[in-house]
Amino acid sequence: MTDLTELGVAAIRDGVAKGDFTAVEVAEAFNANVAAAQKALNAFIVATPEKALEAAKATDAKRAKGEPLGKMGGVPIGMKDLFATKGVQTTAASHILEGFTPEYESTVSQKLWDAGAGMLGKLNLDQFAMGSSNETSYFGNVISPWRRNDGGNAALAPGGSSGGSSAAVSARLAPAATGTDTGGSIRQPAAFTGISGIKPTYGRCSRWGIVAFASSLDQAGPMARDVRDCAIMLEAMAGFDPKDSTSLDMPVPAWEAGLSGDLTGKKVGIPREYRMDGMDADVAASWDAGIAWLKDAGAEIVDVSLPHTKYALPAYYIIAPAEASSNLARYDGVRYGLRDLPDGAGLQDMYAATRAAGFGAEVKRRILIGTYVLSAGFYDAYYTQAQKVRTLIAQDFKNAFTLCDLILAPTAPTAAFGLGEKSDDPLSMYLNDVFAVPASLAGLPAMSVPAGLNREGLPLGLQIVGKPFDEQGVLNAGLAIESRAQFSAKPEKWW
Amino acid sequence: MVTAYRIQGATGEWEVVIGLEVHAQVMTQSKLFSGAATAFGAEPNTQVSLVDAAMPGMLPVPNRECIRQAVRTGLAIQAQINKWSRFDRKNYFYADLPQGYQISQLYHPLVGEGAIEVILDDKDPEGSTKTIGIERIHVEQDAGKLMHDQHPTMSYVDLNRSGVALMEIVSRPDMRSPAEAGAYVAKLRQILRYVGSCDGNMDQGSMRADVNVSVRRPGEPFGTRTETKNVNSVRFVMAVVEQEARRQVAEIEDGGTVVQETRLYDPDKNETRSMRSKEDAHDYRYFPDPDLLPLELDDAFIEECRASLPELPDAKRHRYETALGLSAYDAAQLTLEVETYQQFEEMLDAVVKASGKGERDLAKRVATRSLAVRRRKFSRLTSPATSTSPPRSTPISRPATPARSKPPLPRSWPTTPTRSPSTRAARKRCSASSSARR
Amino acid sequence: MSVDTATVAKIAALARIKLSEGEVAAMVPELNGILAWVEQLGEVDVTGVEPMTAVIENKLRLRDDVVNADPLTGGDNRDGVLANAPAAEHGFFGVPKVIE
C-alpha cells in the first residue's frame, strides 16, 4: 500500500472521495508521523491527534451517507499557532499566552474545518510571528528536516515565521499547513524547505481570530507540497468576513479549476533592482532558470524597475514594529495569559513585570523600536516617512504592472542558513526578507514555489508577485515553473 | 447686558478662560466596534464581547448609527462634516482599557468647526446671547470601570462600558465665566437631546465634561491651563471653573506658577486636586488604526442625516415667539426640554383641532398650562439641566414617539385625534373592536 | 538620531517592559544599529506623497446597530470573557488595587 503521508491535499481529497482509503487511515498515518518527529523537529507546540481523527471520522461518515465531503474533505492539516482554536491552547509561541485557551475559533480555521479538514496540531512559529528562522519561539527552535549534502548534521533553519508549518509539510508530518505572512513569513520558509506557499492579496483571508502582529500587513495563506494543493486550500481559507473591516467583499474564484500552466499572452517582469551586487550564484542561476521556464510556458519576459526596493525593508522595520507595539499592548496579565505580580506590586508594575517575563528578546526589541518611532517628536520622521515610502513602493508595483502581468524574483537571497548563524545580529536576519517584504508592503498576492537545489543540496524558491486580486495569475505561473522545475527532492529522513 | 466676570485677586482683577471637552455617550443599542449592548446598569461584564475584552485576534467593525448620530450632531451645530475621516489609536496602559489603546480620532475628526449660541440671561434670551465656537467633534471608545472598594487588595474591572461610543465635543476657549460654561453645557445638552444623539443623563455618566481653565490679566495672552476631568453636572462644571480659577489666582499671587496638569473635582469638599501624576501620560503615540480603513461618507448619507434632524431649539424658540406670539421668556422655557415642547405642541394641536381657532389665538393659554405642569414637575430641581430624563432606550427626537409621562389633558378640551400615526392606528383598533361588539 | 540608556529606559517604561540596567545597556547598541539603518529612508524624496492609508483599495463598511447580531462579537458572554482570566472574582477581572 502507498504511504499515505506521501500524498498531498488533492490526492487525499480525491482518494478519500473515491474510497481508495479512508480519512481515518490518512489521519492515523499523519498522526503517527507527527508523534515520531516531534522530538527531533519540534514542529508542533501541541499535537491534537484526537481532533484529526474526529474530523476524519466525520468525513468518513459523510461519505458513507453519500453527502458532499467539502473542498478539504478528509485532509488533515497543521494549524500555525497564531490562529485561535477553540478549546485548544493558542500561544503565538509566546510565554505570555502559554495556557491561553480561546473561547472562539478564527475565521480561517473555522472555514477549513467547515471544508472537511482536520487538525493535526498547533504548529510552532517565531514568537508573535517575529522572526525569519523560527528561533524566537518560547517553545524552542524548529529544526528543518533538510540537511546540507556535506555529510554534516548542522541544524538548519526551516525559515520563519511559519517555520513549524514549513518543516511539517516538507517532512511529511502534514500534507498542508496554514501560514501567515507579514513580511515573507509564508514564502521564505516555503523556499527554505522546498514546498509551495502563497500569500494572497491583503484582505482575501480574514484576520479575525489570528493573533495580530502588524495589522496592515498580516495575511494568512496555505503552505503545501504543490501549487494545486495551495489553490485548493486557499479556496477554503479565503472569503469575505464582516468581522474584519479590511476583509475584501469579493467572491472567491475557483482557483483550482482555473489552473493552467499556459502563459501565452502573459508578460512577466524581471525587476532589475532585485539583481543585487554579490548575489548568491545559485540563487541567480535559479532565477535565470525560472525566466527560461516561464518563456517556455509562453510568457513574454520584460525588464521592469521597482526603484524604491532598497527602502522596503527599512520602511517595513518601522511600520511593522510600530503596529506591533500597539497590537501587543493587550498582553498585560489582566484578562488572559501570564500574570507576573511581584510582592507589593501595583498595576503598572504588574504590567511591566508580566511583559518582561512573557515576551522574548526579539519581541521586546520590536516593541521598543515601535514605541520609539511612534513617540512624541519622532512620529513624523519615522512613521509618516515610512508610510510615504510605502506609498512609493506600492506605486512602483503599479507602474511595473502597466508593463507586465506578473513579476518573477527569488524568494530569499540565500538557501536555508544554520540555526544560530544569524541570531546574534538582528539586522542580518532582517535582510533575509529583502525580496519578500516589498510585495507585503504593497498588499500584493505572492507565492514561492521550489525551483531546485543549490550546490549544498538545499532547496531554493522562486517568487511570483501578481496584481491585486490576481491569485490565479500567480498560481498559474507557479504551476508553469513547477511543471518545468520537476522538483521532487525531499529531505532524507534522519529523525 | 451681562457684566464681565472677574476674579478680584490681591493684586487686581483676573479673567478666567474656559474651554470644555464634553464626552457624550452616543445613543445606540450596540457598541462602537462590537455588537455588545450598551444599556445602563447591567450585571458586570455581561455586556462585553470578545472584541471589547481585547482577546487576541479580535477586530473592530464600526457601527453606522454611531457615525450617523455624530454627523447629525455636527449638522445641528452648523459644523463642517468631514467626508474623509479616520480612526487613530491612543496608546496607554490602564486596567479599564483592555486593548492598551483607545480608538479615537486625532488627526482627521469626523466633524470640524461649528458653533452654538448660548443664552446668559433667561429673562432676556435675545439680548444676552454669546456664540461659543466648537473646534471639532470626534467619535471614540469609552473605557471600562474600576471598582476599588470591593476587596482589600484588589480593584475590580467591569468592561460593560468598554467600547461604548462617545462623541467628544471640543469647544474653543471662548467662555469667560462659570455662568457661560454652565450655559454652554446646558445648551449643548439641550441640542443633543433634541437631536437624539445622546440622552444627556449626566448622573449616569452619559455626558461628562473635561474642564480646561486658565486665568490671565484682562487683555493678556492665555495663561497655563489645567484640565479637570469627568465633571458630571452643570452645577459642578460651574463650581470647578470658580474653584480652579480662584486656586490659580492664589497660586500666581503667592509667587507660584500654574502647572499644566490633570485634576479631579471633589464635590464633597468643593475643590479640585491634582491627579497622581503620570510621567509619560502625555506620550500617547497616536497613529492611524491599521485595523480600520479611512471613513468615507457620501452626500446621500449626510443628506439623510440632515433630513432626519428635528426642529432645533433656537429655531423652535424663534418660531414660538414669531409665529405663536409667545413671550421670549415663555418660548425659552417651553423649548428647554424635549418633553415640555412635545407636550405643549400636542396639547396645542389638540385644542386647535377641537376649537377650530388658529394656533396663535390659543398658544398663550396652552403655554401657561404647559409651563405650570413643567414647574410642578421640575420644582425639586435647581437647574433644568440636571432634570431627570427618560430612559435611555426612548429616542427623544423622533416625533412619532410620545413623551413618557404625558400629563392628562384638561377636561374642557375634548381629545380629538391628531394626525400622528400612532393615534390614528389606536383609533382604528378602537373602531374595529367596537364594530365587532356590535 | 540615536538613543542612550536613559532613552531606552524611558521607552521601556512607556512600553511597560521591565528591563534591568544590563538589559538596557545591551539594548542601546542594538536599537542604534536598527535606527541608523532605517534612517536611510530620510534620503527618499517624498514631496507631494501621501502616507499609505489603505494598502488595497477598499471601503470602510459600517455595520447595523443590532445587539448581538453575531454571537462571536456580541455580549452576554461573561463566562467566555472571564474564562482565561488570571484573577476573576464575582464576575469581575481582579487587578492589584489602583489608587486614583
Image: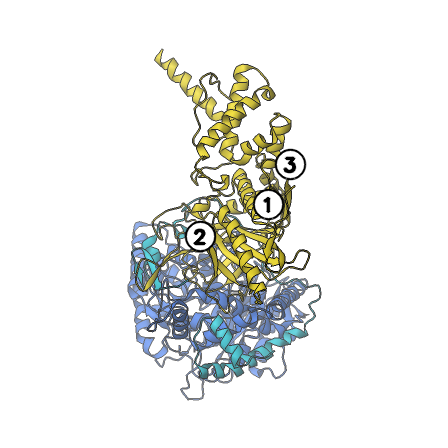
Chain colours: A blue, B yellow, C cyan
Q: Which percent across, then down, holds residue B43?
A: 34, 49
Q: Which sits earlier in the primary sequence, circle 1 or circle 3?
A: 1
Crowding around mark 3 (Cα neighbors within 10 Å: few <14, some 14 to 19, many 20+) is some
Q: Which percent across, then down, holds residue B136?
A: 60, 51
Residue at image x 58%, y 79%? C2
Q: Which percent across, then down, holds residue C26?
A: 48, 83
Residue at image x 54%, y 38%? B194
Letter of the chain that mark 1 sits on in the rendering: B
Letter of the chain that mark 2 sits on in the rendering: B
User: Split into 4 quadrants, where in the image is the N terminus of chain A?
Assistant: bottom left
Res A69 quadrant in image: bottom left
Residue under label 1, please give it. B74
Residue under label 2, please give it. B267
Crowding around mark 2 (Cα neighbors within 10 Å: few <14, some 14 to 19, many 20+) is few
Q: Height in image: C21 above or below B367?
A: below
Q: Secondary structure at mark 1?
A: helix
Letter of the chain that mark 3 sits on in the rendering: B
Q: CA distance from mark 2 to mark 3?
A: 33 Å
Q: Amino acid at mark 3?
A: Glu
Left or right relative to A13: residue B16: right
Left or right relative to C33: residue B429: left
Residue under label 3, please give it. B126
CB-based contact (under 8 Å), mark 2 and mark 1: no
Instruction: Choose between A219 and B231: the one closer to the eye.
Output: B231
Q: Give the residue furthest to the front.
A: B10
Both on one chain, marks 1 and 3? yes
